[in-house]
Image: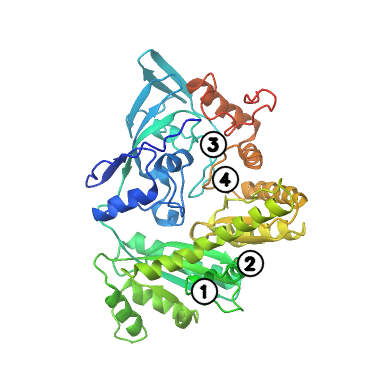
């Protein structure tokens, strides 16, 4: 096992970028950038993730709606190939031509084919090797899950100034209403970015938690720990991040909230948000964390993160007390936004028709959901895997991606979803890329491609 956990050097931030080693955690990066008044926005929700890890999976998270994925922010990479050659890559330096890369090394030129399959047209995907005409070589390594090279250094673009963020938490009685509100928030934000106005509403992310999530949070006491009161009748909770103009203060936000209903209220993002929520009958019950209120913001974010924690504890308990073959069984799928409501129905039908207990949460702002099984037996795990594969086929048919942000790894269900997505021919094209850069299969054996149990080698 090769560990990069001790490669934790962080260079001094430049005005628009920073260079770090792969063992640096997102928490360390955030602390460094905060001290310099800068930010790296496209982070997954788990801040213990490392920079090498997020690059290897093209990780994304809640803020994809505005800030995209890791790939969009990687300016440069240093990569050690299986042969021992070190590539120092800057974006724009090496691009594919005529369907292939010509990678120059000290011992000659490595010809790497570019797959010809078409990737889903959705905001994020973490599904095998990136492929596009005239693509950058950096993009081949981003999302390759350590199978093509070992990342030893990463240069990331950063925001030169930290944006001011407010969080709002909204409880709603049903899914249809939640989808309508989220759509209104998204549409207003898209218009703000199109018009480039400082007064428009600019939502960075909207998170979604269903009724079962809320039941788990109450049972675990997460609502009490985070001081979040959710009515028993609530069926959905939305947690949104609102980006405000630089210099916006908590006092200003609270003043604008208080004046939002007045005819002479200033035209600001917060006033527009309040009026939208008031039109939906939600303003009076909305929780708010204003800029600078770090304690309340941390509580609202902890409320959201308590959902996967609660599910993982239940899976672990079942594994220890019922059957040690029980394992986490979850999907990570994204669809074109117009299909979001359809995807909710798809997941519910798939799990309920098999008599399974489940919870659904995720990033509604980019239509990426995480339906998770709450298994009671090993048989239910197998039924859950079958449900996920069935959902994957439909998601692909809709133009979505069944592997949005967590990668594939050695998980057999995810590897099956990858084959569903690109077919046998696509998998063979990926193998050709792997063989060109790692002909002996040294790097991350079994990741992306199954291995033969008796030999431990990747299946032909």
Dot placed on the residue nearer the N-terminal end, 4 or 1: 1
Mark whose residue sits in front, 2 or 3: 2
- Tell me, yes or no, if residue 168 can be seen here: yes
Q: CA distance from mark 4 to mark 1?
A: 34 Å
- Answer whether labels 1 and 2 touch (C-beta < 8 Å): no
Judged left or right of residue 55, residue 439 is right
At numbered mark 4, what does the secondary structure look like: helix, strand or loop?
Answer: loop
- Answer whether labels 3 and 1 touch (C-beta < 8 Å): no
Instruction: Read off the residue under disc 3.
Output: 128
**Other residues around mark 3 within 10 Å, as few (<14) / some (14–19) / many (≥20):** many
Q: As rendered, which of 207 and 224 lies closer to the eye?
A: 224
Instruction: Give percent across and percent down for residue 77.
Output: 35, 34
Dot placed on the residue nearer the N-terminal end, 2 or 3: 3
Q: CA distance from mark 2 to mark 3?
A: 32 Å
At numbered mark 1, what does the secondary structure look like: helix, strand or loop?
Answer: helix
Q: CA distance from mark 4 to mark 3?
A: 9 Å
Up-down relation of residue 441 to residue 216 (above or below): above
Q: As rendered, which of 120 and 312 lies closer to the eye?
A: 312
Judged left or right of residue 288, residue 316 is right
Judged left or right of residue 185, residue 446 is right
- Answer whether labels 4 and 3 touch (C-beta < 8 Å): yes
Mark whose residue sits in front, 4 or 2: 2
Q: CA distance from mark 1 to mark 2?
A: 17 Å
Instruction: Read off the residue under disc 4.
Output: 403
Dot placed on the residue nearer the N-terminal end, 4 or 3: 3
Quarter residue 101 falls in: top left
Instruction: Read off the residue under disc 2.
Output: 212
Instruction: Read off the residue under disc 1.
Output: 224
Up-down relation of residue 138 to residue 172 (above or below): above
Quarter residue 343 falls in: bottom right
Q: CA distance from mark 3 to mark 1?
A: 41 Å
């Amino acid at each position: 096992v090769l560990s990069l956990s001790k490669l934790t050097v962080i260079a001094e931030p430049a005005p628009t970028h920073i260079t770090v080693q792969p063992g640096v955690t997102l928490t360390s990066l955030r602390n460094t950038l905060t001290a310099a008044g800068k930010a790296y926005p496209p982070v997954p929700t788990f801040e213990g993730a490392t920079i090498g890890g997020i690059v290897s999976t093209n990780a994304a998270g809640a803020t994809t709606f505005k800030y995209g994925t890791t790939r969009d922010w990687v300016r440069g990479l240093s990569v050690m190939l299986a042969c021992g050659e070190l590539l120092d890559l800057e974006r724009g330096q090496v691009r594919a031509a005529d369907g292939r890369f010509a990678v120059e090394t000290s011992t000659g030129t490595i010809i790497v084919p570019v797959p010809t399959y078409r990737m889903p047209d959705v905001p994020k995907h973490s599904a095998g090797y990136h492929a596009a005409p005239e693509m950058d070589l950096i993009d081949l390594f981003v999302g390759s899950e350590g199978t093509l090279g070992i990342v030893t250094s990463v240069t990331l673009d950063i925001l030169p100034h930290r944006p001011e963020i407010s969080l709002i938490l909204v409880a709603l009685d049903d899914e249809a209403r939640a989808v309508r509100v989220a759509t209104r928030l998204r549409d207003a934000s898209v218009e703000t970015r199109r018009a480039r106005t400082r007064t428009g509403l600019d939502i960075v992310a909207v998170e979604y938690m269903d009724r079962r999530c809320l039941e788990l949070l109450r049972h675990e006491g997460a609502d009490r720990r985070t001081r979040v009161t959710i009515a028993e009748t609530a069926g959905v909770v939305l947690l949104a991040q609102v980006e405000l103009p630089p210099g916006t203060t908590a006092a200003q936000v609270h003043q604008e909230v208080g004046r939002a209903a007045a005819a002479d209220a200033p035209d600001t993002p917060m006033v527009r948000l309040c009026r939208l929520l008031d039109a939906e009958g939600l303003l009076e019950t909305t929780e708010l964390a204003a800029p600078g209120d770090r304690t309340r913001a941390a509580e609202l974010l902890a409320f959201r993160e308590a959902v996967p924690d609660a599910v993982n504890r239940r899976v672990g308990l079942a594994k220890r007390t019922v059957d040690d073959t029980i394992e986490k069984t979850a999907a990570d799928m994204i669809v074109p936004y117009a299909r979001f409501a359809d995807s909710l129905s798809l997941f519910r039908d798939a799990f309920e028709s098999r008599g399974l207990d489940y919870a659904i949460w995720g990033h509604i702002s980019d239509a990426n959901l995480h339906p998770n099984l709450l298994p009671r037996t090993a048989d239910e795990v197998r039924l859950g895997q079958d449900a996920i594969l069935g959902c994957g086929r439909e998601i692909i048919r809709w133009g979505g991606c069944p592997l949005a942000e967590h990668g594939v790894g050695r998980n057999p269900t995810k590897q099956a979803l990858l084959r569903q997505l690109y077919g046998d021919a696509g998998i063979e094209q990926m193998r050709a890329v792997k063989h060109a850069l790692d002909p002996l299969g040294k790097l991350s054996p079994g990741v992306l491609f199954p291995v033969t149990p008796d030999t431990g080698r990747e299946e032909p």
